[in-house]
Image: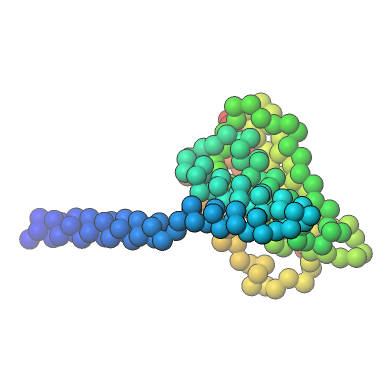
Amino acid sequence: MVAEKIRSEIYIEKIEKEKAANELNFLRAQFNPHFLFNSINSIYGHIDKNNKPARDMLLKFSEMLRYQLYECNVEFIELDRELNYIKNYIDLQKSRIDERIKVTFCDAGIGGNLKIAPLLLITFIENAFKYVGFNDARDNYIAMGLNYNNGNLVFNIINTRDVYVNPVERSSGLGIANARRRLELLYPGKHELVIDDHEDYYEIILSLFGV
């Protein structure tokens, strides 16, 4: 009876895995990247040639999408390619936020053969743009920096924020929680994440050791 129960559990687990795989394949089949990029090209062709900012934004969006779809299916990717994606994202976000909010990003010419988990830093950058606040009585900014020294990669980001933030929004941190989990899996014992959740600013310092 025990043996039969074990066989049944193994069989059920196998069926569930096959079902999940089939469902994933079905969902993938519904999403046709070629159709999406063809649509982007069509939209690009309909934008007035004199509207250079809109055409440039669409090209950057297309480049970001291509990166997510075709290049991120790896555990680690060249830092240069990740930085290109990040800079495109920052440019798009700068076009939609209040122009009085100063946005800076400094990578100190980092390059070479460094690799990083794809789409790891973008979580923190998205968070900064989402919650950056504006107040006429102070400087308002998002400041980002990436430094590499003696095998250690340090990413720092700080943004001003509104004092009066919806408590539900302030406590929601699914993206940060997911980033923490990815760090635990990909950089076990080789990372440090420090978060300063201050009343009027939010700062994150992420250190990756032995990169």
| Residue 133 horizontal/vertical position (percent) | 79, 64
Residue farthest to the left?
Answer: 1
In terms of image quadrants, where is residue 92?
A: bottom right
150 is higher (above) or lower (below) than 30:
above
Decide if residue 211 is in sight here: yes
Q: Identify the residue at horizontal 49%, vertical 56% (top origin).
A: 35
| Residue 206 horizontal/vertical position (percent) | 65, 44
Residue farthest to the right?
Answer: 137
Indicate how the structure is coloured in the image.
Answer: rainbow
| Residue 15 horizontal/vertical position (percent) | 22, 59
Q: Identify the residue at horizontal 70%, vertical 58% (top origin).
A: 47
Report the number of discs.
Answer: 0
Q: Is residue 84 left or right of residue 180?
A: right
Image quarter hosting the N terminus: bottom left
Nearest the viewer among 13 and 55 is 55
Nearest the viewer among 168 and 80 is 80
Image quarter hosting the C terminus: top right
Q: Identify the residue at horizontal 76%, vertical 40% (top origin).
A: 106
192 is higher (above) or lower (below) than 115:
below
Nearest the viewer among 162 and 39 is 39
In terms of image quadrants, where is residue 26?
A: bottom left
Q: Is residue 35 left or right of residue 207?
A: left
Q: Identify the residue at horizontal 56%, vertical 61% (top origin).
A: 174
Q: Is residue 130 left or right of residue 184?
A: right
| Residue 66 horizontal/vertical position (percent) | 55, 47
